[in-house]
Image (cartoon, rainbow, N blue to C red):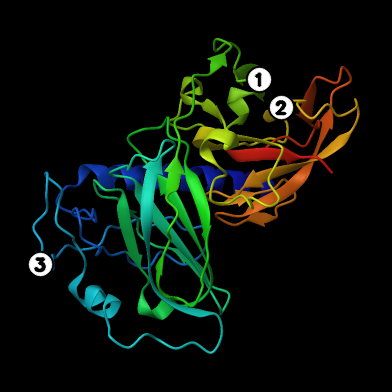
Amino acid sequence: MGAIVSRLLTALILLLLLLVASACDKAATNDNTLPDGDTDAASSDGDSDHESAATDEDDASSDGDDAPEDGDEEIEADAAEEDDAVESTPPTCEAGAAVQSVSGLVSDENGAPLKGVSALLCVYNIDGSSACLSPVRSNTAGQYIAYVPEARRCVDHLALRFLKSDDLDLAPLACPVALGLGGEIVIEEPARLAKAGPTARDPLGDPTAAHRLTANGVELSLVPEKMALYDIAYEDIDLLVWDAARYGWPCFVDSADPPDGLVAFAPEVAADDPDAAHLAFPNTAGLDAGTLADLYLLGGVSTYTWDETHIEEGQWARIGEARVSDDGLRIETLVGQGLPALTWAGWKRR
């Protein structure tokens, strides 16, 4: 029963995040988009814990220093919060790092800047509490900045989640954030949101039966009725087989210890059953039939394994095993150990 409740909560949070991000895109008068060349935007404290996607946008006010260019909206932030964000004396913390803000760039897979991407900063504090803040949006240059509320500035670790609600073909991405010395953290490497598809798929038939989706040799076996789709259609789900040789590794992968295969899904969807979503990679490593490999999953919005272990946003976690098929052609997830969520998944030889 606990597993079912967790899956339902996960699905509801995913839906809520999509609705919030969509509202951000539509509300031009309540927008945290940065104007070109500016470096100020604001985010507010989230609800209470790591499962909470933000539900409110910040009240608006502009600093008035720079006019927006090319139709970009001016910066909007709660005046009191903005004063906190630019305070001259950084906070001190007995442990962890004192973080005031996190900023960076977001681009497509080819490096072109993306405007209107929601950047959601998740803060894990030294006292064990955590919250995901209200999303901010990238400007025409792909720039974003999220301010950390004063009450949450003593940080143990951080993660950023990127989502473009008006383009479900872009695979959502979650990235761990290096704290360094804290303060005003600037992430030098752009976060890349890549477009999934095209995906070949079985026509939708009996929703209780498995349907096959394939892209570049990777196969997803999906039971639509056992996925928390809500307002997402089976036909909306696409695969992106990541080409590291062309694009490099995404932000959550250790380039010194990368997976042997990596695939992203768009949009992000939770599974309600351990056999609802099974994945098979081509056996490009030439491993012998029956060989076991490690299976990994990226933590997204409220992602849990089947034994109820929480995978935090931006965490690249081993979740189980995969096995080389009897014919030696594929590396497959095991029966009863399918993917708990469609975020990013990969395998690695032992």
In percent of width and height, residue 125 lies at 52, 74
Question: Is residue 159 toward the left or the right of residue 167 in the image?
Answer: right
Determine the CA span between mark 1 and mark 2.
7 Å
Residue at 72%, 36% in the rendered image: 274
Provide residue 30's location: percent of width, then percent of height.
Answer: 19, 54
Viewed as shown, does residue 320 lie left or right of 37?
Answer: right
Residue situated in front as seen by the camera: 22 or 194: 194
10 Å crowding of disc 1: few (<14), some (14-19), many (20+)? few
List the residue tagged with mark 1: 217
- Residue annotated with mark 3: 65
Front in this rendered view, residue 156 or 217:
217
Can residue 324 be seen at all in this image of the molecule? yes
Count of labels in the image:
3
The correct choice, above or below, for 329 with respect to 160 in the image is above
Q: Earlier in the sequence, mark 3 or mark 1?
A: 3
For the residues labelled 3 and 1, the Cα–Cα distance comes to: 52 Å
Report the disc number at residue 281: 2
Q: Which residue is outermost to the front?
A: 245
Q: Earlier in the sequence, mark 1 or mark 2?
A: 1
Q: Position of residue 176 (x, y in %)?
A: 54, 58
* Local SS, label 2: strand
What secondary structure is marked by label 3? loop
| Tags 1 and 2 touching, CB below 8 Å | yes
In the figure, residue 70 lies in which quadrant?
top left
Q: Earlier in the sequence, mark 2 or mark 3?
A: 3
- Residue 150 lies, in percent from the top left, at 37, 79
> With respect to residue 225, does 92 lie above or below?
below
* Callout 2 amino acid: Phe
Amino acid at pointer 3? Asp
Q: Residue at x 27, y 83 (%)?
A: 87
Q: Residue at x 63, y 17 (%)?
A: 211
- Classify 10 Å Cα crowding around label 2: few (below 14), some (14-19), many (20 and above): many
